[in-house]
Image: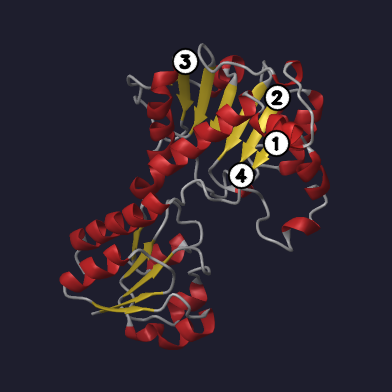
Amino acid sequence: MKILIIDDLHPAFKERAIALGFEVDDKPLITREETLAIIKDYVGIAVRTKFRIDLELFNAAPNLKFVARAGAGLDNIDEAIANERNIHLMNAPEGNRDAVGEHAIGLLLSLMNNFRNADNEIRTGVWDREGNRGYELKGKTVGIIGYGFMGQKMAQKLAGFEVNVIAYDKYKTGFTNEFAREVSMEEIVKHSDVLSLHVPLTKETRQMVNDEYFYHFKKPIFFINTARGEIVNTSAVLANIKKGKILGAGLDVLETEKFPALGEQDWYGDLKTSGKLILTPHVGGWTFDSYRKISEVLAQKLAEIKL
C-alpha cells in the first residue's frame, strides 16, 4: 500500500507510516499535473495547501482510500465527493490548536496596547505616551464564535487573564466549562468587548461576518480572525473601523491571500494604511512546533483507520 506526500510534512508522518507497513513516496515539489499522472497507484495522499483535492483528482485515483490533510480545516478537499466514494478524510486540528490560540492572543494584546503604532513611531523619532495608552484585558468579556478545538484552546489560554469568556456554537450545546460559558448569539453581540472567530469555512460561514453582522454589536469591539479569511468581508471590517465600532482588528487570514492577487483588491489600499489593523500571513497555526505536532497527530490517526 502506497502513500504519496505532495507537500512539506514533518518526517514523523512518513516514519510512522513506514512502520505501519506503508510504502511512502515523499515528493514535496511535485506538481498537480505530475500528481494526476501517478495518483492511480496510491491508496493515500497527504497534503497541506498545495492544491485542491477535487473531482478531477479523485477521478484519477481509483484506489484512493484516504486523504491526510496536514492542518486544521478540510476546505481544500471536496468532502462531498470523498464521502460518496467512502474515502476517509483525516485532519489535525489537535496539532496546531496551541499555535492558533497563542497567535490570537498575541494579536489581541498587540492591538489593545498599540504595539505596532508605538514601535513605528519610536523608529521615526516620535515619543507619544498619551497617544499609545492601551486597554487592559482583565475584566473584559471575550466572545468566541465556534467552540471546537480552536475555540476551546483559545478559551483555555485566556483563563489566566481574568476575563469573562462567553462562547456560541450553532452546532454544539452543553459545553459550558471552567473556561467558557455557553451563550446565545444575542448575548455575544450584547456583551462582547472582544470577538474571536474559530469556525470552519463552509457554504454557511462564507462571508458570514459582514456589515450587518457588526451592526448588531452593542459595544465597540476588538476583532480577531485566525479562522479563514473568506468568512469575513474585509470591506465591512474597514468600514466599521472608520465608524468606531471596531477598535482594532487582528487578521491572520484574508479573503484573498498572497501576492499579486492581494494587492489587486480594491480594499487593499485601506487595509495597508489603517493604523487599527495588525496583519499576519496565515501563520497562526504554522509554528516550528505545530509542524511536528500536526504530522504526529496524522500519523496516530493513520494507525487507527481500517483500510
Task: Name the spot of residue 62 as percent of width and height, x first.
Answer: 36, 81
Cα distance in 3D space between marks 1 and 3: 24 Å
Q: Nearer the viewer, residue 126 or 269?
A: 126
Cα distance in 3D space between marks 4 and 1: 17 Å
Cα distance in 3D space between marks 2 and 1: 9 Å
Of callouts 4 and 2, the N-terminal one? 4
Disc number for residue 164: 3
Left-right relation of 215 to 66: right
User: Element at badge 1?
Assistant: strand
Left-right relation of 176 to 161: left
**Three-letter amino acid code of the residue under disc 1:** Leu
* Residue 232 sits in quarter: top right
Of callouts 1 and 3, the N-terminal one? 3
Of callouts 3 and 4, the N-terminal one? 3
Of callouts 2 and 3, the N-terminal one? 3
Disc number for residue 247: 2
